[in-house]
């Protein structure tokens, strides 16, 4: 779970989204979900990462 959290934080920061260092996986997913212009590559990475977490919703920007 720690590796997933770190990967999500990295993706968010690379997208220019500020993430607190103690953010949970859920918080990072919410932050990513607030960005309405996620790139297709980022959505693909998120879908891959979140698939292993069962029950974590993919950001709406990736379902359009």
Image: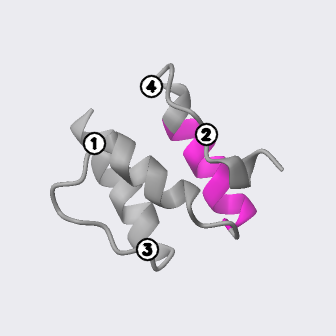
Looking at marks 1 and 2 on the same chain, the residue that comes earlier in the sequence is marked by 1
Residue 39 painted magenta: yes
Percent position of residue 14, x then y: 45, 74
C-alpha span from label 3 to label 4: 22 Å
Q: Is 17 placed above or below 11 here?
A: below
Which is in the foreground here, disc 4 or disc 2? Answer: 2
Q: Which mark is residue 3?
A: 1
Stretch in magenta: 38-49
Quadrant of residue 42 in the image?
A: bottom right
- Mark 1 is surrounded, within 10 Å at the Cα level, by few (under 14), some (14 to 19) or many (20 or more) other residues, namely few
Q: Which mark is residue 58?
A: 2
Looking at marks 3 and 2 on the same chain, the residue that comes earlier in the sequence is marked by 3
Looking at marks 3 and 1 on the same chain, the residue that comes earlier in the sequence is marked by 1
Q: Residue at x 50, y 39 (%)?
A: 49
What colour scheme has been applied to the protein in the rendered image?
Answer: one colour
C-alpha span from label 3 to label 1: 19 Å
C-alpha span from label 4 to label 1: 12 Å
Which is in the foreground here, disc 4 or disc 1? Answer: 4
Looking at marks 4 and 2 on the same chain, the residue that comes earlier in the sequence is marked by 4
Quadrant of residue 35 in the image?
A: bottom right
C-alpha span from label 1 to label 2: 18 Å
Q: Which mark is residue 17?
A: 3
C-alpha span from label 3 to label 2: 17 Å
Looking at marks 4 and 1 on the same chain, the residue that comes earlier in the sequence is marked by 1
Looking at marks 3 and 4 on the same chain, the residue that comes earlier in the sequence is marked by 3
Give the residue at the far right of this rendering.
Answer: 64
- Mark 3 is surrounded, within 10 Å at the Cα level, by few (under 14), some (14 to 19) or many (20 or more) other residues, namely some
Closest to the observer: 1 or 63? 63
């Amino acid at each position: 779970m720690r590796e997933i959290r770190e990967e999500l934080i990295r993706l968010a920061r690379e997208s220019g989204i500020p993430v607190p260092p103690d953010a949970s996986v859920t918080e990072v997913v919410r932050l990513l979900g607030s960005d309405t212009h996620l790139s297709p590559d980022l959505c693909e990475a998120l879908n891959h990462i979140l698939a292993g977490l069962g029950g974590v919703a993919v950001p709406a920007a990736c379902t359009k």
